[in-house]
Amino acid sequence: MVASDLQQMPIFASFSDEQLAYLESQGSQVALKAGETLFEEGDSAQGLYVIVAGEIEISKRVGGQTMVIANVPSGSFVGEISLLTGLPHTATARTTMPSRFLKYEASLFDAVKASPITQLIVMTMVQRLRDTESQVQQHEKLSALGKMAAGLAHELNNPASANLSAATQLPETLAALQTRTLNLYAAQLSGDQLAYLAELQSQWIERIGKADDLNALAQSDCEDVLIDWLDDAGIVDSWQIAPLLASAGIAVDELARIQAQVGGEVFAPALDWLESALTIGDLAHTLQRSATRISDLIKAVKAYTYMDQAPVQEIDVHEGIESTLIILQDKLRSITLNRSYNRGLPRITAFGNELNQVWTILLDNAAAALGGKGNICVSTSLENEYIFVEIADDGPGIPAELQKRLFEPFFTTKAVGQGSGLGLSIARRIVVERHRGMIHAHSRPGDTRFQVYLPIE
């Protein structure tokens, strides 16, 4: 290894050749095979390790189980906290592939640790950084949870209100139907006429659930035509009946046929009876549609959180993206959403709920950048050995000088108080460290793209 190897690492990019040569001369090379341990949780600090090539997995024992905290790639260093604080390692570092390190012995840092005040400052600084990040992450999670809960409450409120309204009207309408049924039988219609009305009732109820929704202008025009015809036929309160008939697609020629079949004197009670049955069908359709909407939202939440499922499993990225879009529907309501999916993509083994957090962060940022108006495009494809997911928006863009800092913890382009600066940092950790993928950002005015690469294997 030569000094130029170190210079390729971002952490040493600003060092001169002389400084890099000195750093190399002070360290010793260490090589480990895949699966070997660099240090164990509880071990005393042995030195500072720079990862020259390869990758290490950082894990910690929590509640009797081993939890993977991060995967640290080459170009990083580990062991610095224990080295500077003098405390034992709080996690275990193990290689995931053949790796090479440059090790700096603990004795090189004795001068730094010799002064009690220096050690106190370092320990205080580390603890404050941990506390700050923990508090901000907790606030970020609670804030995201609050936003999600508010969005779900809004989405659930509409179908729940529709259900309550339909359930309230149903008893009154059933009572009216009973009365109108008796009135119809009192008219002494023939068996053929009753059979005709019964068949017509069944057809109308079926049509109310399948009729195409009309725009406001077309609906109003249909109602006006029906009201004029019903008035001419001597129907009282025609304006109350016309909206329901129009929504079911009932035209005046059908009403004329009914009038001819049952006679002018019986037409009014027959129409009243049909209208009551049609109203019950409409209420039943409302109940079914609202219950379906509530059920779909619950399914989306369960899919989004992978409730009652193992953390790691085979997933279809499209299912996660779609459940996230449903969860964020309230924020995306006034935004035009375009999908370009390659449905032939293979399933991958992943932390499904964590990837959904990534989609949430990227989509929420895109919606915020658009300010409620604009276009978002979500596309998927296969790029070599990676599943490629791109979320693009046509917002104002991110200044070029800020783009290189987007994934830094606590860095945000939002106004003070509107963002913690941890969203994209968390997204990067999930994609890069948890799934060994890649995440990139490209932005110019009118075209901002966040690209996620997830390895198939």
Image: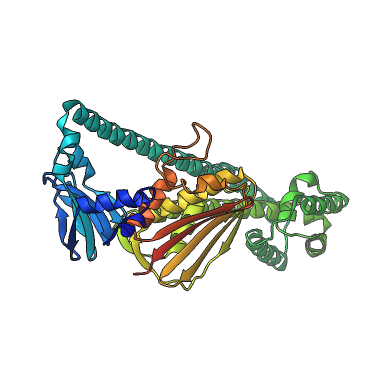
Quarter location, residue 113: top left
Quarter location, residue 378: bottom right
Q: Please name whichever residue, 143 or 115, is drawn nearer the observer in this view of the structure.
A: 115
Residue drawn at the location 72% of the way across and 58% of the way down = 188
In what quadrant of the picture does the N terminus appear?
bottom left
Residue drawn at the location 16% of the way across and 27% of the way down = 116
Outermost residue toward the right in this view: 232
Q: Position of residue 133 (x, y in %)?
A: 33, 37
Q: Position of residue 31 (x, y in %)?
A: 18, 62
In what quadrant of the picture does the C terminus appear?
bottom left
Residue drawn at the location 63% of the way across and 63% of the way down = 206
Q: Please name whichever residue, 424 or 150, is drawn nearer the observer in this view of the structure.
A: 424
Q: Please name whichever residue, 387 or 28, is drawn nearer the observer in this view of the structure.
A: 28
Q: What's the coloring here?
A: rainbow
Q: Position of residue 354 (x, y in %)?
A: 37, 53
Residue 230 can be seen, yes or no: yes
